[in-house]
Amino acid sequence: MRQGVVIIAGALLLLAAAGCGSSSSGSSGSTSGSSGSGGQRTIAGVMANDHGTKTVSKETEVELDDFYFEPTVIQGKAGQKVTLELKNEGKVEHSFTIDSQGVDKTLSPGADTKVTVTIPASGSVSFYCKFHKSSGMAGALAVEGQGAGGSMPGSGTTTNTTTTGSYKGY
């Protein structure tokens, strides 16, 4: 009986270790600075599956996948207009929605489009997938150096967090 408990405990530890992971995003084009992370954290007041932070100057690519945005936080100068090249690399339909800016783009799997957004004058503004927000598919536009709320320090880096609950490791 005792041996069975030890085997079950060991199997659970292996499953927990397999589910943990991190992702990093590199710089390209006119972007600078990037930080990869993993897990879930509160970003701009919304629980999000964290897939890093990127500081941008004019244009950057944003991956929409099942069920996260990469990068999750897009930083820039206050009031700056930024063109995002949205690419749905997932297996289901996703949206890129920013209520306060009137942005609501829906993309089928494999589709891509461009959208111009504005970094807020201060703080951060959340974006999300209207179909999967409750699964943690959210992120934020943030003023560089001010962070996006939650566990992001003002330095523009992100910290790994321990996940609990329904996070699926995406």
Image (spheres, helix red, strand yellow):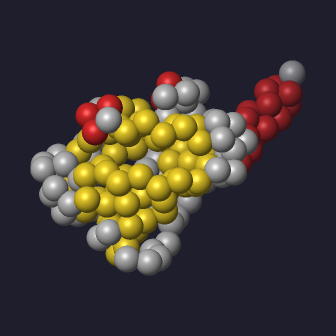
- Extreme residue in the top direction: 1
x%, y% of residue 8?
80, 31
Q: How many marks?
A: 0
Residue located at (40% from left, 43% from top) = 139
Quarter location, residue 43: top left
Query: Can see residue 30?
Result: yes
The quadrant in which the C terminus is found is top right
- Can residue 169 be seen here? The reply is no
Q: Position of residue 2 (x, y in %)?
A: 82, 26
Q: Position of residue 55 (x, y in %)?
A: 32, 66
**Relative image position of residue 79 (x, y in whole percent):** 16, 56
Q: Nearer the viewer, residue 86 or 136?
A: 86
Residue closest to the far left: 121
Q: Is residue 34 above or below residue 147?
A: below
Relative to 75, is 87 on the left or the right?
right
Q: For this rendering, which residue is in front, 164 or 62? A: 62
Identify the residue at image location x=87%, y=21%: 1
Q: Is residue 150 above or below residue 147?
A: above
- Looking at the image, residue 6 sits to the left or right of residue 125; the answer is right
Q: Residue at x 42, y 58 (%)?
A: 84
Q: Is residue 44 left or right of residue 1?
A: left
Instruction: State the residue in front, 142 or 97.
Output: 97
